[in-house]
Image (tube, helix red, strand yellow):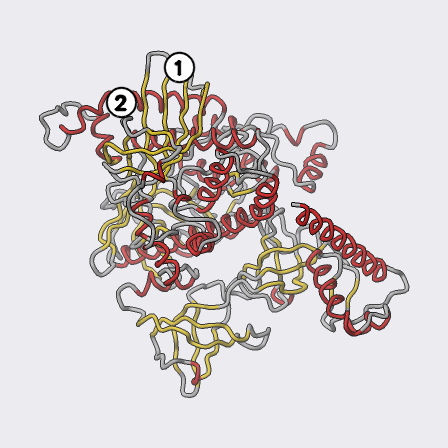
């Protein structure tokens, strides 16, 4: 311990000295008499010995990343001319781009001549050129909602490359080839010398490793590393998305060997010291095709209190910190659920075997045992290591039938075995209603958008798209998991221990202001928002100052909840719900407990899915060490060191998985509509942009009616009301409006569907 303290003291001294040297460099560059110099000139001016110039280079690199220095095209260092920010570059097919900066609510616009050689996904350093009205757009604008805020920036330098490989279609020429990227945000084809083509021919889907990122007048260059197959071969479409997002598929030999060595039975040694809950009536409720069952529940009621047990598979017992299995799980971050496959975080031998809470076998778990009164308050709880045995493996559909359909009796063969569970299921239903009411009273927001299930044939072609909606059983499990997640988060927050929280910050002022202005057109109001501009004199200036300082909106989640309740059942419900959701920030993982706006709670975490989410697996380790009294100073320091990167990486990988899942759904929807060109459907306007209106069908398929295909000569887009108005006809198209459309065409590469307007009453569905 003493040696560790000495090492920490030495590291602290070295860090302080390093910061002083960086401060001296900044003072030198900021001096009025300083003229921009290259690294070598700075070294000579400062009389840095040749053997120490490597250290000088490192200091200069750090100052560039921190934004305290900048370097021009000639490699000369100088003081930044404007505010320096770091973000992610998002290119556009037309050559310009945007930079996402985490602390800003809106993206920065990068003109084509100022991209600085940045490629899609690169981490870049930019300098702001103005504070507005110069050509940028907000993140919503990329989804078809324009705004007035337009901040321009210039890329100073590329810090790290975001992608190293591209998936696309190969086109062969006589002495070389080109790859047209699947990612349409990449504005240039990839040049491939013939000797690097790996024998690819025109029409092959290939993976290309980028060897040269090119410049303004020169295409990027690469070499083919894998031929996925012909563009029309079955399965190549989804495989292309998998490769395009660099999703890991198979596991390495070392990981698989380690997984195979794990015992498939719970031993007596494993059970030692654990709470034995095997005699309790525990059940799992999941989808019919689920194989990795990581949560079980139990409920009892004594007339005054409910006892809710949420029992989560103890995956950490088999995935040790720092092991090959753990490193691979951290690298993946999450399981990815594509339309035709699952890419798991852990090998199936674990996730479907010893770590799955299968019916009738002993399993290790972490249990959150809660006592809940008749008002939905959690009056007492205990978190413990346990050994459990699930009595019944049930499905959402089966539980829904048992709870909602009359006439089911013990004589029905398919349900007779579950008749004994009906009393507990009724108690679960009642407890779920209490918990949901409690969450509603404090302002929890519930966005209930229809999801879909796409059914494929043996060749991977879509045969049916079914809307998937939540039912009494799915809501029950959701309510119980939310209760456990919140209870665990509160427990560790008040102990001031290092932890990974799930946070959802309050929305920004400008987004709520714009939402409130739009809702005013429909006669809806958000409390205290509509009057913001009319505060004491200088109200608008106050709002601008709030925005500049990054202050959240002056709004409670209960006001959003009230809005959604008011529009429930109204024609504009779906439209207002979508716009409200787009006004929210994205949830993420963090070591700082910043609260969860959507759930209207101060402490929240992800505890209930360690098989498929790495943050859950990570906090299980912390929970077990705390329960066993092993969270000493060294372990606390260890977690404080590693958890920020765990949270950041998990958030990034979660976004990657979400995007890949959306892309596979979009692709299969395009393929489904390919076979239905010319057919007519009823839908509703789901989006209005300057280039046309988007229409969503009941099965969740969405397509565009281009402005050029609207009836009449000229249409004008009204941004404030999200309406398209025909100047000649006076016809208005607004969000939520029912319309009949005919399928006009599809594009697999762009994953888009084009509609034409059809006559009312012509629809077949």
Relative to 6, is 553 above or below? Answer: above
Quarter of the rendering containing residue 611: top left
Residue toward you, 423 or 279: 279
Q: Name the residue under label 2.
A: 424
Residue at 45% in and 42% down = 616
The percent position of residue 349, horizontal first and vertical second, equals 30, 52
Q: Quadrant of the N terminus?
A: top right
- Is disc 2 surrounded by few (<14), some (14 to 19) or many (20+) residues within 10 Å? some
- Disc 2 vs disc 1: which is toward the camera? 2
Q: Quadrant of the C terminus?
A: top left
- Is disc 1 surrounded by few (<14), some (14 to 19) or many (20+) residues within 10 Å? some
Quarter of the rendering containing residue 439: top left
Relative to 306, is 84 above or below? Answer: below
Is residue 415 left or right of 572 when viewed as pictured? left
The percent position of residue 41, horizontal first and vertical second, equals 82, 73
Mark 2 → mark 1, Cα distance in angstroms: 16 Å
Residue at 49% in and 42% down = 582
Among numbered discs 2 and 1, the one appearing first in the sequence: 1
Q: Name the residue under label 1.
A: 374
| Secondary structure at numbered mark 2 | helix
The percent position of residue 125, horizontal first and vertical second, equals 66, 59
Quarter of the rendering containing residue 128: bottom right
Is residue 494 left or right of 675 when viewed as pictured? right
Is residue 114 left or right of 596 when viewed as pictured? right
């Amino acid at each position: 311990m003493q040696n560790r303290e000495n090492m920490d003291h030495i590291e602290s001294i070295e860090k302080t000295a390093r910061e002083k040297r960086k401060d001296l460099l900044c003072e030198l560059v900021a001096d009025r008499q300083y003229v921009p110099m290259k690294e070598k000139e700075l070294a000579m001016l400062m009389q840095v010995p040749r053997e120490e110039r490597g250290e000088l280079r490192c200091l200069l690199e750090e100052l560039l990343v921190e934004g305290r220095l900048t370097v021009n095209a000639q490699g000369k260092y100088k003081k930044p001319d404007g505010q320096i920010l770091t973000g992610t570059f998002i290119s556009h097919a037309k050559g310009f781009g945007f930079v996402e900066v985490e602390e800003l609510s809106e993206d920065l616009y990068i003109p084509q001549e100022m991209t600085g050689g940045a490629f899609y996904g690169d981490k870049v350093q930019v300098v702001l050129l103005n504070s507005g009205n110069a050509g940028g757009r907000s993140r919503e604008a990329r989804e078809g909602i324009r705004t007035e805020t337009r901040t321009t920036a210039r890329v100073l330098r590329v810090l790290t490359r975001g992608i190293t490989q591209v998936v696309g279609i190969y086109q062969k020429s006589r002495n070389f080839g080109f790859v047209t990227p699947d990612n349409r945000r990449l504005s240039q084809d990839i040049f491939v010398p013939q000797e690097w083509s790996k024998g690819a021919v025109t029409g092959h889907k290939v993976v290309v490793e980028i060897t040269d990122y090119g410049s303004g007048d020169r295409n990027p260059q690469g070499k083919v590393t894998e031929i996925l197959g012909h563009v029309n071969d079955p399965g190549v479409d989804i495989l292309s998305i998998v490769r395009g997002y660099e999703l890991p598929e198979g596991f390495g030999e070392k990981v698989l060997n380690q997984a195979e060595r794990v015992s498939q039975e719970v031993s007596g040694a494993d059970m030692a010291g654990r709470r034995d809950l095997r005699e309790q009536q525990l059940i799992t409720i999941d989808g019919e095709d689920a194989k990795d069952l990581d949560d079980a529940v139990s409920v009892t009621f004594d007339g005054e209190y409910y006892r809710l047990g949420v029992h989560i598979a103890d995956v950490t017992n088999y995935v040790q910190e720092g092991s090959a299995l753990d490193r691979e799980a951290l690298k993946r971050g999450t399981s990815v659920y594509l339309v035709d496959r699952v890419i798991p975080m852990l090998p199936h031998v674990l996730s479907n075997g010893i770590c799955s809470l299968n019916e009738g076998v002993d399993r290790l778990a972490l249990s959150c045992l809660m006592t809940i009164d008749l008002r939905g308050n959690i009056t007492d709880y205990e978190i413990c290591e346990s050994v459990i045995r699930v009595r019944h493996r049930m499905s959402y559909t089966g539980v829904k039938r048992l709870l909602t359909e009359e006439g089911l009796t013990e004589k029905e063969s398919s349900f007779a075995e579950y008749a004994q569970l009906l009393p507990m299921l009724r108690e679960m239903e009642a407890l779920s209603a209490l918990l949901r009411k409690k969450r509603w009273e404090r302002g929890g927001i519930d966005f209930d958008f229809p999801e879909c299930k796409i059914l494929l044939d043996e060749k991977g072609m879509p045969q049916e798209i079914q809307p998937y909606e939540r039912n009494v059983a799915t809501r029950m499990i959701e309510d119980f998991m939310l209760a456990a997640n919140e209870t665990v988060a509160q427990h560790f927050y008040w102990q001031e221990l290092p932890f990974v929280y799930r946070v959802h910050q309050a929305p920004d002022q400008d987004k709520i202001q714009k939402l409130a202005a739009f809702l005013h057109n429909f006669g809806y109001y958000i409390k205290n928002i509509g009057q913001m501009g009319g505060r004491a004199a200088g109200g608008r200036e106050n709002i601008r100052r709030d925005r500049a300082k990054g202050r959240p909106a002056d709004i409670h989640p209960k006001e959003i909840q009230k809005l959604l309740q008011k529009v429930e059942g109204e024609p504009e419900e779906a439209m207002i719900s979508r716009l409200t959701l787009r006004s929210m920030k994205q949830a993420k993982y963090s070591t700082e407990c910043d609260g969860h706006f959507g759930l209207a709670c101060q402490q929240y975490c992800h505890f209930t899915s360690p098989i498929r989410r790495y943050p859950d697996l990570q906090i299980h380790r912390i929970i077990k060490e705390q329960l066993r009294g092993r969270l000493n100073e060294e372990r606390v320091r260890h977690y404080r060191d590693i958890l920020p990167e765990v949270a950041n990486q998990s958030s990034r990988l979660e976004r990657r998985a979400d995007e890949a899942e959306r892309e596979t759904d979009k692709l299969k929807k395009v393929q489904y509509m390919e076979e239905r060109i010319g057919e007519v459907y009823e839908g509703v306007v789901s989006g209005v942009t300057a280039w046309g209106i988007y229409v969503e069908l009941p099965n969740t398929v969405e397509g565009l009616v281009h402005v050029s295909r609207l009836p009449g000569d000229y249409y004008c887009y009204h941004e404030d009301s999200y309406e398209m108005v025909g100047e000649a006809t006076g016809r208005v198209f607004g969000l939520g409006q029912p319309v009949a459309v005919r399928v006009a065409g599809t594009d697999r590469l762009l994953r888009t569907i084009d509609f034409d307007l059809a006559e009312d009453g012509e629809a077949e569905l």
